[in-house]
Amino acid sequence: AHHAHSQQSIKATPSVRALAKRLNVDLSHIKASGEDGRITSFDVEKAAQLNSDMGQSESLKGVRKAMAKNMAMSHAQVVPVTLHDDVDIHSWYDAEGETDQDITMRLVNAIAHACACEPNLNVWFDGEQLSLRVSEQIDLGIAVDTEQGLFVPVLRNIGKRDLSDLRQGLNALRSAVKSRKIPPQEMQGATITLSNFGTLAGKYANPVVVPPQVTIVGA
């Protein structure tokens, strides 16, 4: 039904539709150049040429579609400012390079302390109303990478829970993400986000802030 509706909202004459069918071009993937957003025969031929040169385009679905929308929203609403710093954590390791530290939980703990010191890290900002909503509770979104895309489950109230409880909570969230059994409400309402880009490579990164949040910590 959704596909039929999107086909109806596409503006193209019967002859242009017939041309698209003949050239195996999906009209919903075409940016119209004609008047009133009409697709022209030139648009169809250009798309057919692209398809033969570069291969067919595919519509994003599910998580990847949501990620793309979030990226666009961030680009439109957030002025990106990134601060880089290095932290010496040699004392966390022994001579053999082994550690019993739960590094993620230490970061979670550090974020809770930072938000207590600087509450404006843990706010929602409304760019249209130009208003700030400062949150007493710190609900931390933690980015979890999967083959389907990036999920950001929310670890609730990190400032008021002990680390073993938080670790159990994070393990439960991660396994729910991996098994695709996580309810949507468990990925809503984050007030600040932690992202670990070490799985990609690189020493520094500029993580993307997703509105209405104002802060993301990358490690």
Image: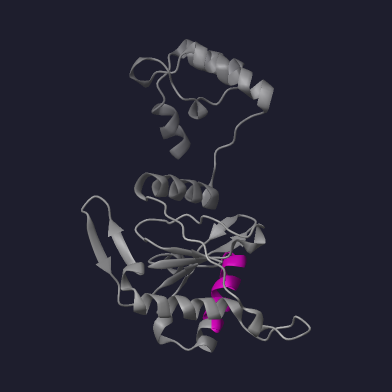
x, y percent for residue 192: 41, 67
Left/right of residue 59 with respect to residue 147 in the rendered view: left
Which residue is painted at 51% across and 62% down in the image? 84
- Residue at 56% across, 56% down: 205
Q: Main secondary structure of the magenta part?
A: helix
Task: Reply above or below: 202 against 93.
Answer: above
Residue 105: % across, % down: 55, 80
- Determine if the magenta segment contains residue 18: no
Assign the C terminus to one quadrant of the image: bottom right
Is 108 in front, or is 41? 108
Q: Please report the residue visible at 44 percent of the width from the left and 39 percent of the height from the top.
A: 2
Q: In this orientation, which residue lies closer to the viewer: 146 or 164? A: 164
Above or below, 184 against 28 in this view is below
Is 174 in the magenta? yes
Q: Which residues are magenta?
A: 167-180
In the rendered image, residue 194, in percent from the top left (x then y), is placed at: 50, 67
Task: Answer with left or right where residue 41 lies relative to residue 136.
Answer: right
Residue 79, compared with residue 38, is above or below; it is: below
